[in-house]
Image (cartoon, coloured by chain):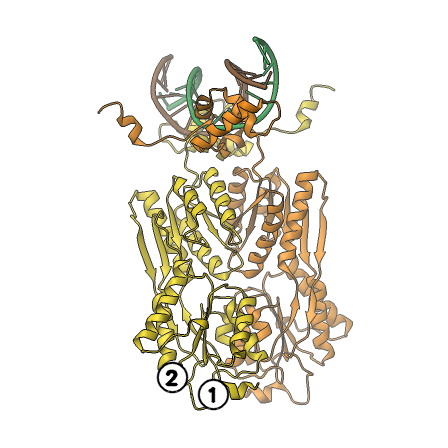
Chain colours: A orange, B yellow, C green, D brown
Amino acid sequence: MSPAHKQETKRKRVTVKDVALEAGVAIGTVSRVVRQQSNVAPDVRKKVETAIRKLGWQPSLAAQSMRGVASRSIGFIFSDIRNPLYAEMAKGAEDLLAQHGYVLVVASSDGRPEVEQALIERFARWNVEGMLFSIEDESHPGLSQTLANINFPFVMVERDHPLADAAVGADHYRGTFLATEHLLLLGHRRIAMISGGNQKTRVSRDRVAAYLAAHAQQEVAVDASLLRLDSFSQDYGFREAQRLLSQPDPPSAILALGMRLLPGVLSAVRSKGVAIPENLSLVASNDSDLAQLAVPDISVIRYDPYILGREAAQLLMQKLLKGENLNHLRVETPAEFIMRSSCSVHHPSRPAESILGA
Amino acid sequence: MSPAHKQETKRKRVTVKDVALEAGVAIGTVSRVVRQQSNVAPDVRKKVETAIRKLGWQPSLAAQSMRGVASRSIGFIFSDIRNPLYAEMAKGAEDLLAQHGYVLVVASSDGRPEVEQALIERFARWNVEGMLFSIEDESHPGLSQTLANINFPFVMVERDHPLADAAVGADHYRGTFLATEHLLLLGHRRIAMISGGNQKTRVSRDRVAAYLAAHAQQEVAVDASLLRLDSFSQDYGFREAQRLLSQPDPPSAILALGMRLLPGVLSAVRSKGVAIPENLSLVASNDSDLAQLAVPDISVIRYDPYILGREAAQLLMQKLLKGENLNHLRVETPAEFIMRSSCSVHHPSRPAESILGA
DNA sequence: TTGTACGCGTTATCAA
DNA sequence: TTGATAACGCGTACAA
């Protein structure tokens, strides 16, 4: 119970006060030293700097933030960190932001709009200076409400939103058009498309529009039942591919548009004993190890998610650093169609049914 | 220049004061309402709540943090968000933390210790309550210095560090031992191991130790030149596999231990025209779509990174919520060997050289 | 049960 | 050039 015990309990946070006391100056001077202001005598600066090092002091971000100091951090919200597309975007954004002394902070929402809202509010309270979004449903009313209350710039990635300062996305329209056109020119007349998003996102809408446009251009009628747009999950790819191939009138080609869909579709195709490309042509998106190394290798629609993240961050920096008004700029990065061995000419004379069995 | 212009310039942040004014109460009352304290009259509570909604007020995290309110956030630093292993760990941690109202904040370091240090300090200043680490070099002096100054709990994932409150990792020793033993029992005598970490991490050391132990157990001499431990990158896998297969005395089996190594090694194997499993047996780690769907499918050492992240977060919560002392607990999650078609009996009578050509 | 006033650690203003 | 002091927004003793 001696007074010395007070020391032992737990050392408190060191503050400017401690540093000022140690250096024998006023707290204002300490602040001036760390803020690199010029109007401080060299010897005083030395004293303060040694005191800071000795005590290991660092200005509290919370206190700085209260004084309106910029947080130098950007938030990024998407559905699932395990999706390599988002991971790649995050890396692209991270790298660019790092060049400007900004740090990227990410969180995943599980695709649930309520979670997205909660996370946005959380980030806002963290005083992030801007945000990147890849939300699940562009027209969710609650989310739009939250977005309307935001008082910092934000950019959509692979999404569109009227409230966003800008939006970046790959040219999925072109990629999907090229792929569909290619299949049509090979003679395919029943082309299935398995993908997610349900036309609730820019990506999903562009894909459907391109699919329809290619059919219209080639004057081929569309069977809407061949469009399966409910999910990007591997399970969904497996299930829908199985269903499609079990139909009395199965498709002769499948577009599997989503990273996790390819493994699902490939599994289903193998389990049904269907040969690629002899009995089924297949196109996937995006490119992947699996697409490159599968036998046969899989034709893909390819685009670079790293660039997308990088571009989005770049726009945010333009707004933040130079005060440029982005006024709803919409940037499109290229998407290309890479032809590999998974597509072949369709022979209507040898219908798939007879090969698949009853 | 009428006074009304002041309104137009830019609305300031909404604070407790505004809410109190709106509700006709004192700021203390507002605070009590949001902090869910019971000693507040129902009608007053109603008034305050409507005022809060009307103004859209949210307490500033910065100000709360200054008052010592917990930030409910945990940081996670690893080398690269694009590595699906880390993404999976992050998701596991995220899910568990969410159950307790905590949010996970991640940042990647590019594997550079200086960046790791900077990020740790940044997170510390953000007042995170705890951290998860998967650092690159467990014995880096500068990093240890930084770790020593941390005043919140932290847990290592797939790593060891004497200063950490706890560490979790998969049982790579067992996984690697089983795989190596399997190959040895198939008659392989020259087994290469391509991996990263250079024995600077727990994972890397365990793998090498298991490789050596299995050889010792089977009384097979080890050729240290077959160990390639410099990187986890795809390029490294490609290059080292090519080199190994071009040697006058090439290995008859390869352990490719690292997510990105398998595609690299597979490419190299194909470019050399070597047949799996006839002329080369192959084991990869961790499991992946590619390993499952490649032809032939690839035997793997499998473990669940989601569980690792989840477990690490769980430990952190025990410490934070229940005040439990973890005292350097080291948790190991299981790793298993999954046999597929990429391994076969080695026939010394038909040496690989003759097949590979000059 | 409610209101008042202080302090958290920092930066900025103003006076010295 | 430096020092003192007022904010920033919130939580909480303490007073009413």
From this view, report whether residue A12 is shown above or below residue A244: above
Distance between mark 2 and mark 1 Cα atoms: 13 Å
* Amino acid tagged 2: Gly
Q: Which mark is residue A291?
A: none
Residue under label 2, please give it: B187
Rendering coords of residue A343 (x, y %): 66, 79
Residue A180 visible here = yes
Quarter of the rendering occupied by the C terminus of chain B: bottom right
Q: Which residue is mark 1?
A: B351
| Chain identity of mark 2 | B
The N terminus of chain B is located in which quarter?
top right
Viewer-proximal residue, A139 or A38?
A38
Along the viewing direction, whichever of A5 and A170 lies nearer the viewer: A5
- Residue type for callout 1: Pro
Residue B2 image-quadrant placement: top right
Q: Is residue B93 above or below residue B349?
A: above
Question: Furthest residue to the bottom?
Answer: B349
Q: Is residue B47 at all visible to an observer of this figure? A: no
Question: Residue B70: percent from the left, percent from the top?
Answer: 41, 37
Element type at mark 1: loop
**Reading the chain from its start, which is encountered first: label 2 or label 1?**
2
Q: Chain of mark 1?
A: B
Q: Residue A193, image x and y in percent?
A: 62, 70
The x and y percentages for residue A7 are 31, 28
> Disc 2, disc 1: CB below 8 Å?
no
